[in-house]
Image (cartoon, grey):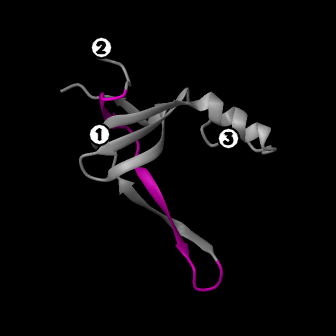
Amino acid sequence: SLSGEKEIGSAIILTKDLLRKKFDYTDGVKYIGSEIEVPKGMIGIIKRKTPAQSMRDFWEKNGNTEPHWSGNSEFIYTVTFKRGGTQSNILDDMIEPYKK
């Protein structure tokens, strides 16, 4: 694959921390903040690449009125990181091609 591409099998570097939301379940469900799941700078391999527009169309077709969480991202990726496992719902602005 050409350098600069974000294709399946390409190495990428994470440009933002991936956060995991934390909840307290003692009295119902209460959001209590978030923690870093995969830190910025981690290197991974793209495993899946899905056009985001199809998800936005499905979202609207099902009566959701809030904007879809994918924003203006052209694609939504699934990436396997060397440390941090496989993560889904990665957006265009969260990754850059990794150049050794």
Residue on which the image places disc 1:
44
> Nearer the N terminus, badge 2 or badge 3?
2
- Kind of residue sitting beneath label 1: Gly
Residue at mark 3: 68
Q: In this view, does 8 lie above or below 39?
A: above
> At 42% across and 50% down in the image, what residue appears?
18
Q: What element carries label 3?
A: loop
Q: Report the residue at 38% width, 57% height from top.
A: 37
The magenta stretch spans residue 14: yes
Residue at the far top: name it.
Answer: 2
- Residue 60 coordinates in the image, percent (x, y): 76, 38
- Split into 4 quadrants, where in the image is the C terminus? top left
Residue 61 falls in image quadrant: top right
Q: How crowded is mark 1: few (under 14 residues within 10 Å), some or many (20 or more)?
A: many
Whether residue 29 is in magenta: the answer is: no
Marks 2 and 3, how far apart at CA? 31 Å
The residue wearing badge 2 is 2
Q: Which residue lies furthest to the bottom in this view?
A: 26
Magenta-drawn segment: 8-28
Residue closest to the eye, 28 or 55? 55
Q: Which residue is drawn at 80% across and 43% down?
A: 65
- Horizontally, residue 99 falls left or right of residue 72, namely left
| In the displayed structure image, the side of residue 20 where residue 38 appears, left or right | left
Secondary-structure class at tag 2: loop
Left or right: where 75 falls relative to 45: right
